Amino acid sequence: MLTLPIKRKWLEMIRSGEKKEEYRALSPYYATRFKRFLGLELISASQAQVESALRAAGGVPFKDIILRAGYSLSAPATMISGYITISTGRPEWGATEGEEYYVLHITGMEDLLTDEKSRTYGEKKERKN
């Protein structure tokens, strides 16, 4: 299972269904994390090999990636499933115009309620409005 940190703003947009993609930089760091979804378990698989395989496949399914709003074990978290591609992202969802990313297209999710604070965050936000 892979856990990725995410800003609370983006996590709440994903949870509400407004944001349907999450973006990660095209970097060796994320290539290492995503290569298992491509069947490239070999330690020697380079970033270029991961990107090439992903572009050739046109999208690779994933499941059980956890997006967590912070590093604390009590931080709100959501488990997502979907597919990974490489493409540009939407600026309104945090992407830089014209830049390519690993794009996690979210087709399913399950909130992981980690503590009372995260469970009531949405309720408090609604009461203020």
Image (cartoon, helix red, strand yellow):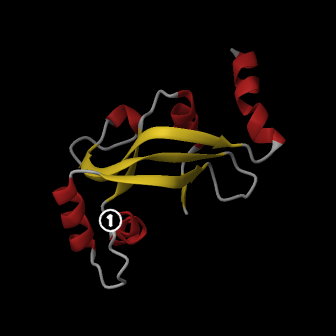
Residue lying furthest right in this view? Answer: 116
The residue singled out by tag 1 in the image is 38
Residue lying furthest top in this view? Answer: 129
Residue at horizontal 42%, vertical 35%? 20
Q: Is residue 124 above or below residue 39?
A: above
Q: Is residue 70 above or below residue 8?
A: below
What element does badge 1 sit on?
helix
Position of the C terminus by quadrant: top right
Residue at horizontal 21%, vertical 56%? 57
53 left or right, relative to 22: left
User: Tag 1: Cα neighbours inside 10 Å, few (<14), some, or many (≥20)?
Assistant: some
**Labels in figure, total:** 1
How far across and how far down the image is residue 96, in percent? Answer: 30, 44
Residue at horizontal 29%, vertical 79%? 45
In terms of image quadrants, where is residue 110?
top right
How far across and how far down the image is residue 24, in percent? Answer: 38, 54
Q: Is residue 15 above or below residue 66?
A: above
In terms of image quadrants, where is residue 54?
bottom left
Position of the N terminus by quadrant: bottom right
**Three-letter residue code for mark 1:** Leu
Residue at horizontal 73%, vertical 43%? 113
How far across and how far down the image is residue 73, in percent? Answer: 73, 58
Residue lying furthest bottom in this view? Answer: 44
How far across and how far down the image is residue 128, in percent? Answer: 73, 18
